[in-house]
Image (spheres, rainbow, N blue to C red):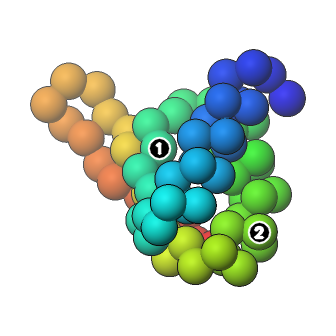
């Protein structure tokens, strides 16, 4: 796992510990997607409801729900 991947996971852990129920993450790298899926059972136990991925270029952006 790369340093950036580690930091994203740590940020999400922090937000969930403080009561966040929905997370939005902007990424293009599939490594991060794999990390999110791997950690999702732990986050589900802590009441995270959904994770969203934002993708796009310029003014055209799409949101994708990552099912937990």
Q: Which of disc 1 and disc 2 is earlier in sequence?
A: 1
Q: For this view, does 61 lie left or right of residue 27?
A: left
The residue located at (38%, 44%) in the rendering is 54
Number of residues whose C-alpha sits closer than 10 Å to that of mark 1, classed few (under 14), some (14–19) or many (20 or more): some
Please, is residue 54 above or below residue 15 in the view?
above
Q: Depth-wise, is mark 2 or mark 1 nearer the camera?
A: 2
The residue located at (74%, 31%) in the rendering is 6
Q: For this view, does 54 lie left or right of residue 33?
A: left
Q: Which mark is residue 42?
A: 2
Residue that protrudes farthest toward the left in the picture: 59
Number of residues whose C-alpha sits closer than 10 Å to that of mark 2, classed few (under 14), some (14–19) or many (20 or more): few
**Which residue in the protein does label 1 denote?**
25
Identify which residue, 11 or 57, lies in the foreground: 11
Please, is residue 63 above or below residue 5 in the view?
below
How far across and down, in percent of the image, does residue 17 sit? 58, 61
Alpha carbon separation for disc pair 2 and 1:
17 Å
**Quarter of the figure that contains the N terminus:** top right
Q: For this view, does 17 lie left or right of residue 50?
A: right
The residue located at (30%, 48%) in the rendering is 62
How far across and down, in percent of the image, does residue 48 sit? 55, 72
How far across and down, in percent of the image, does residue 26 sit? 44, 37
How far across and down, in percent of the image, does residue 28 sit? 54, 31
Q: Is residue 12 visible?
A: yes
Q: For this view, does 11 lie left or right of residue 3?
A: left
Residue 64 figure quarter: bottom left
Please, is residue 30 above or below residue 1 in the view?
below
The residue located at (61%, 36%) in the rendering is 8
Q: Helix, strand or loop at disc 1?
A: strand
**Quarter of the figure that contains the C terminus:** bottom right
Q: Helix, strand or loop at disc 2?
A: helix
């Amino acid at each position: 796992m790369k340093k950036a991947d580690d930091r994203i996971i740590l940020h999400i852990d922090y937000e969930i510990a403080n009561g966040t129920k929905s997370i939005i993450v902007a990424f293009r790298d599939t490594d991060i997607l794999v990390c999110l899926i791997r950690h999702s059972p732990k986050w589900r136990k802590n009441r995270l409801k959904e994770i969203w991925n934002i993708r796009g270029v310029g003014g055209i952006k799409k949101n994708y729900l990552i099912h937990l």
